[in-house]
Amino acid sequence: MRLLHTMIRVNNLEESLKFYCDALGMKLMRKHDYPNGEFTLAFVGYGDERDSTVIELTHNWGRSQYEMGDAFGHLAIGTADIYKTCQELKAKGVKVVREPGPMKFGGPEIAFIEDPNGYKIELIQTEERS
């Protein structure tokens, strides 16, 4: 078994696709409208769905806002240079809600950004900095 995808509901699909594809560099794997159910699914990620976990963006037609629950934590993305990544994302207008730096109780350097829907995304330094 393996993890296939994580689904999140989005307020505006085009705005979310711009964030995940343009700002974060993911690829749109597939997108399909379901007129009878009045929703659209778009799958985005860094690698092919056959061997990589992706994010399913669900847009329910006629709905433009959701309540953020307190059970969901965040998505996480690894990056080789967290400081450079945050600079580049800020230049693209991405909201950095926790600047890069070491975790309070030890561990890798992390940062948090926020997508257009308010979902938190943790960026984790994956390589040693020199």
Image (cartoon, helix red, strand yellow):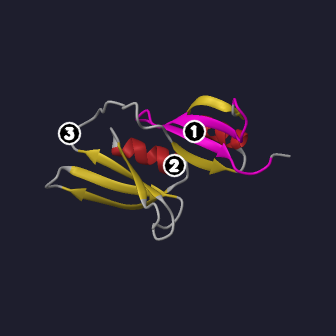
Please report whichever mark, 1 or 2, sits nearer to the chain's N-terminal start.
Answer: 2
Q: Nearer the viewer, mark 3 or mark 2?
A: 3
Check whether the beta carbons of the residues at disc 1 and disc 2 lie within 8 A of each other. Answer: yes
Quadrant (top left/top right/bottom left/bottom right) for the N terminus? bottom left
Q: Which of marks 3 and 1 is in front?
A: 3
> Picture coordinates of residue 48 (x, y %)?
49, 67
| Direction from residue 57 to residue 90 in the image, left or right | right
Quadrant in which residue 85 is drawn: top right
**Secondary structure category for the residue under label 1:** loop
Per the rendering, the mark at residue 46 is none
**Secondary structure category for the residue under label 3:** loop
Instruction: Name the one closer to the observer, 44 or 5.
Output: 5
Per the rendering, the mark at residue 62 is 3
Check whether the beta carbons of the residues at disc 3 and disc 1 lie within 8 A of each other. Answer: no
> Picture coordinates of residue 123 (x, y %)?
61, 42
Q: What stretch is highlighted in magenta?
A: 104-128
Q: How crowded is mark 1: few (under 14 residues within 10 Å), some or many (20 or more)?
A: few
Q: Does the magenta stretch include residue 63?
A: no
Q: Which amino acid does label 2 sit on?
A: Asp
**Badge 2 is on which residue?**
22
**Residue at coordinates 61% horizontally, 29% vertically from top-left?**
98
Please report whichever mark, 3 or 2, sits nearer to the chain's N-terminal start.
Answer: 2
Q: What residue type is labelled 1?
A: Lys
Residue 93 shows up from this direction: no
From this view, report whether residue 43 is shown above or below residue 96: below
**Badge 1 is on which residue?**
92
| Direction from residue 5 to residue 128 in the image, left or right | right
